[in-house]
Image: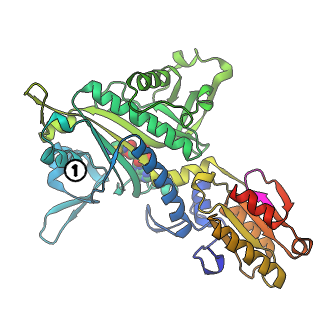
Amino acid sequence: MRLSRAFLPVLKESPSDAQIVSHKLMLRAGLVRQTAAGIYAWLPLGFRVLKKIEQIVREEQDRAGSLEMLMPTIQSADLWRESGRYDAYGPEMLRIRDRHDREMLFGPTNEEMLTALFRDDVRSYRDLPRTLYHIQWKFRDEVRPRFGVMRGREFLMKDAYSFDLDEAGARQSYYTQLLAYLRTFQRLGIRAVPMKAASGPIGGDLSHEFIVLAPTGESEVFYDASYEEMDWSGSDLQYGDVAGLRALFDRIGQTYAATDETHDEARWSEVPATSQRTGRGIEVGHIFYFGTKYSDAMGLRVSGQDGGMVTPHMGSYGIGVSRLVGAIIEASHDEAGIVWPDAVAPWRVGLVTMRADDGPSASAADGLYRKLHDAGVETLYDDRDERGGVKLGSMDLIGLPWQVIVGPRGVAAGTVELKNRRTGECQELSAESALERLTA
Ligand code: 5CA
């Protein structure tokens, strides 16, 4: 993408209405614009990041055996009356009437809808277990939308729902999602620690929040440093491995991690002092097992193996996809701007001509841009006729993993500059070597 043809409005000043660094940087680097309180338009750069996150979430769900589908944003109030949540949900639900005066709502989540879909088409134990998911916009009329996309009113969520014949099966589905979440967050380039949630909707030990560590997080967190060494992506634990998944769940249960809501001083004191880590965190995912709460209320029953009827056990599993954009920035930035983890960077390389008005520099940069493009390296090319310093400042702000800087002096000497955004390390090398490094 040539910056001269892009829609990438970069702001010099920090917007005064933004309180936290990710919100400031998202506005300054042109990722989003607010269109109404807690509602955001995703500009091209922000949209690319959102899509990359979504794709990683999707791949890890698919790998765990979840089935993707798409449910609508607008739902009927009657559906929610069946579960009893229509009145219980309160003012957070955006209620709408259509032209026939029918009561509708903008979905804050989809337990009811999927339970009804399942009820209408699933008859037998042979069709279970199943986990289905979608990635869809939600609306919650939060009292205090704040921190940009972090607590929005309209936000993008991945929500998965599992159906099993009994609690033992539902536990397997829960452990499966637990592993899928650990792998998802690791691939996104962030450390998200699973913490037992205050209490699931039906109590028990099966509700976890996934917390990204960042100083501006809403909750205080306490965790064992051994989470910092755990490698979920590299582990060869298979999704069908019943004992292995149970062992994973037990290991997480035994390794201390809690938010201020569930913190237990007695257990904390057993963690060796050198391993105690405290800080603040942002909730990027939440998983629940809730038994037969919805299947009971909504009459979802299937024929069991022995001929009797069975009420399926369910769980639901959310990831805040749009919130993750903010959370990743909170966890990965410096004074100059955003520092994108490779996996979610909107482009891999930022190519800059220091002097677009200098013929040899411009043609060297053009040539390199073509080669990067042909090699399939996602490149943002700042070909504008602007001061070099301003362009470098914008590139640092936007935070692409690599910068290639082309200037008249280098071109005369046959070199370009290759800069690593995270380490700041700069290297002068030939354009060919830079290309080799970036395509390796
Ligand atoms: N039905 C369940 C699981 S699918 C559910 O809705 N869980 S939730 O309420 O915890 O939401 C799931 C995730 O969505 C949260 O972990 C959070 O990352 C994200 N989320 C929730 N509210 C907001 C909001 N107002 N703005 C941005 N993200 C949000």
Residue pictured at 13% horizontal, 27% vertical: 305
Image coordinates for residue 229, horizontal then vertical, percent: 63, 30
Q: Is residue 358 visible?
A: no
Q: Is residue 404 left or right of residue 124?
A: right
| In the image, residue 320 above or below residue 375 | above
Q: Residues within 10 Å of mark 1 (few under 14, many from 20)?
A: some
Residue pictured at 60% horizontal, 18% vertical: 271
Q: Is mark 1 within 8 Å of ligand 1?
A: no
Q: Tell me the quadrant of the picture where the C terminus can be found.
A: bottom right
Q: Which residue is mark 1?
A: 113
Residue pictured at 77% horizontal, 50% vertical: 423
| In the image, residue 13 above or below residue 439 | below
Q: Is residue 56 left or right of residue 329?
A: left
Is residue 405 a member of the stretch shown in magenta?
A: no
Query: Quadrant of residue 123 in the image?
Result: top left
Q: Which residues are magenta?
A: 418-423
- Which amino acid type is marked by label 1? Met
SS class, disc 1: helix
Q: How many marks?
A: 1
Q: Is residue 254 visible?
A: yes
